[in-house]
Image (spheres, helix red, strand yellow):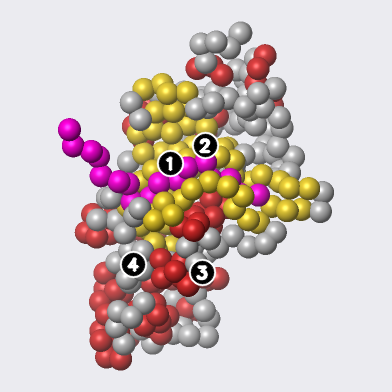
Amino acid sequence: MTSLPEPVLSVRDLTAVFDLPGGTATAVDHVSFEIAAGETLGLVGESGSGKSVTALSLMRLLRAPGRVASGQVRFQGRDLRSLSEPEMRRVRGAGIGFVFQEPMTALDPVYTVGDQIMEALRVHGLASGRAAVTRARELLDAVRIPDAASRLRDYPHQLSGGMRQRVCMAIAIACRPALLIADEPTTALDVTIQAEILELLRDMRQELGLAMLLITHDLGVVAETADRVAVMYAGRIVEQGPVRDVLRDPQHPYTRGLLTSLPGATFGQPLRPIAGSVPLLGAFPNGCTFHPRCPDRFAPCDAAIPGAFHTGPDRTVRCFLHDDHAAR
């Protein structure tokens, strides 16, 4: 009997909190998922659901008053939480690339884009001098920036938003990482540029064999790009499974609400937004955090946290509707 290969990234019960004056607030609550080589997992949810905090926690970039309270993060078989900071710095960039949400703040305005790409190469000992210049030009070519040789001398403010995002992607793949984390990579870009960035991400995954964590609030982006999806709400993953299965047959009321609130979801019918809003950090309700907004809530929802019920191959749902022992 052959064993399955170990996933590139395995996250188990990751919990991140913020130490606030009024007490400790949980932002990410026992989050678990895996990503295999060459696979894209879409992490989707409304703003404030904990997606970006999850990504920063994986990279050990969460700043005080935030901290990772518990859980395990294994990358290529290594427990990232047990590494020293110098060891972790070698993982960032070389093993895990990160594309930040806002490229204008991710790039240093006083250095040329060429300098910033070459710095990533030098820090990890991959190239220096003329070799670094050549490699930086190749990376700009790889992310489809025209006239790459002259663009190396440009500063971030001289580039469009789409160009800046491509530079961030070039830096993220400079060391040929095994995993790429892309946090809302198409935010604030127009529709045409969004499509180009998503196509570029798909091509990079295929050409480089990347595992990818794609963080977004857009289910359309997930449908086009991801293999599996994890739906996050108020710090918890409430539904997870293959993209086609989840989008065709959503089994959590929150996932159904996200889909019915999309333009064109029901032809000829008005949009049906989810009532209410995501609770504020530190004010999450007891029990299922979605229950105040849920049209299907019943007795146990406000008192107990639902477990992750298996509803099919590679599918889990945190909802008492799938608990045969819950009294309705």
Q: Residues within 10 Å of mark 4 (few under 14, many from 20)?
A: many
Query: Which mark is first along the chain, 1 or 4?
Result: 1
Kind of element beneath mark 3? helix
Q: Nearer the viewer, residue 157 or 285?
A: 285
174 on left or right of 306: left
**What residue sits 73% from the left and 47% below the top?**
24
Q: Which residue is mark 2?
A: 237
Q: Residues within 10 Å of mark 2 (few under 14, many from 20)?
A: many
Residue 162 % position (x, y) = 42, 66
Residue 221 % position (x, y) = 40, 45
Task: Name the amino acid, label 4.
Answer: Ile
Q: Which residue is mark 3?
A: 85
Q: Nearer the viewer, residue 149 or 124?
A: 124
Q: Answer whether labels 2 and 4 touch (C-beta < 8 Å).
A: no
Measure how far apart labels 4 and 3 are at the Cα level: 21 Å
Measure how far apart labels 2 and 1 are at the Cα level: 9 Å
Q: Which residue is mark 4?
A: 173
Residue 195 in view of the camera: no
